[in-house]
Image (cartoon, rainbow, N blue to C red):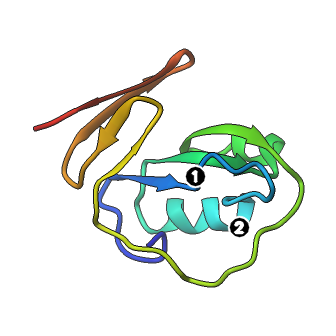
Amino acid sequence: VLGAPGNGGVVVVDGGGSLRVALLGDLMAQLAIDNGWSGVIINGAVRDTGILAGLDLGVKALQSNPRRGSKTGSGAHNVPVTFGGATFAPGDHVFSDDDGVVVQAP
């Protein structure tokens, strides 16, 4: 998904809250930037947090984990996901600051 044109959008990934491996690192984050994504919200872990903090990409995740995940390409895209008491549907608007994320239907 991050390799496709983002047009300023935000990718929301439901990793099931797993902290076992990171679902995003610096290389995938740079790919997102290169393709015009403005942010990534992950119900799971990320890695390379020092580098991520310096990139022009909004990133929200539960925690960090240095363990790299496998790139299986599995999963559904362009579908609603629910976690953290919120449902994120394609086309919704998300707003974020240091305290959290709010989702709003258009």
Q: Amino acid at mark 2?
A: Leu
Q: Secondary structure at mark 1?
A: loop
Check the image and report above or below for 7 versus 56. below
**Which residue of the protein is positioned furthest toward the bottom in this rendering?**
72
**Which residue of the protein is positioned furthest toward the right in this rendering?**
66
Q: Nearer the viewer, residue 44 or 32?
A: 44
Q: Position of residue 12 (x, y in %)?
A: 43, 51
Q: Nearer the viewer, residue 27 or 66?
A: 66
Label count reads 2
* Disc 2: which residue: 27
* Disc 1: which residue: 16
Q: Secondary structure at mark 2?
A: helix
> Residue shown at 63%/84% (left/top)?
72
User: In which quarter of the view is residue 22 placed?
Assistant: bottom right
**Which residue of the protein is positioned furthest toward the top in this rendering?**
99
In this image, 81 relative to 89: left or right? Answer: right
Q: Amino acid at mark 1?
A: Gly
Q: Position of residue 52 (x, y in %)?
A: 71, 46
